Amino acid sequence: MGMIARLAVLCIAAAPVSAGELPALSCRGDNWSLALNWETATFEHDKVLEMTVPQYSVAEGHDWPVAVTLISDFDTAIAIIDKRQCQANGVDAFYTAEVLTQRGTVPVLLTGCCMVLE
């Protein structure tokens, strides 16, 4: 399923989850990072953005993936976090991230791995 179609399904058929069920994550990819505690996030891609998390939800009938809406004063992003094994810099991670954002008016899709923050 394509990314846009997958995002549409997640947004249409979503069920809320509670923050107590989700670990704080540190996600990284090529030239970007995301620290996510499910209420706020710090997203770095070209610039550092302090973002709020107004909502997140899981696909209907599943525990994962989780679609996360991220908002700052002038920027937005949607992160799709999935509980799948991933390898980043030779280290095994247990979550993946796909971040849909923009650079000006150009859509950008970023991919990477996430580790649980201690």
Image: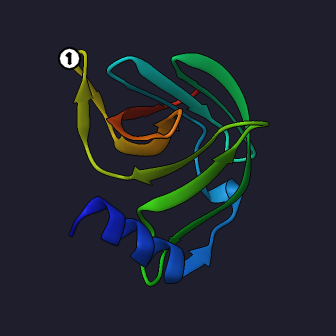
Name the side, left or right, on which 2 lies relative to 33: left
Q: At x 42% / y 64%, what residue is drawn?
A: 64
Image position of 101 with respect to 22: above or below: above
Q: Which quadrant of the figure has residue 51?
A: top right
Q: At x 44% / y 43%, what residue is drawn?
A: 99
Q: How is the image coloured?
A: rainbow
Element on which disc 1 rests? loop
Q: Which quadrant of the figure has residue 114?
A: top left
Q: Which quadrant of the figure has residue 75?
A: top right
Image position of 63 with respect to 3: above or below: below
Residue 65 at what x, y percent from top left? 41, 62
Q: At x 25% / y 15%, what residue is drawn?
A: 89
Residue 47 at what x, y percent from top left? 59, 16
Q: Quadrant of the N terminus?
A: bottom left
Residue 45 at what x, y percent from top left? 50, 22
| Residue under pointer 1 | 90
Name the side, left or right, on which 46 lies relative to 90: right
Q: At x 60% / y 38%, what residue is drawn?
A: 24
Image position of 30 with respect to 111: above or below: above
Q: Nearer the viewer, residue 105 or 112?
A: 105
Which residue of the protein is positioned furthest toward the right in this rendering? 73
**Label 1: how many Cα within 10 Å (few below 14, some 14–19, many 20+):** few
Q: Quadrant of the C terminus?
A: top right
Which residue of the protein is positioned furthest toward the front in this rendering? 105
Residue 60 at what x, y percent from top left? 47, 82
Residue type of the residue flagged with mark 1: Gly
How many marks overall? 1
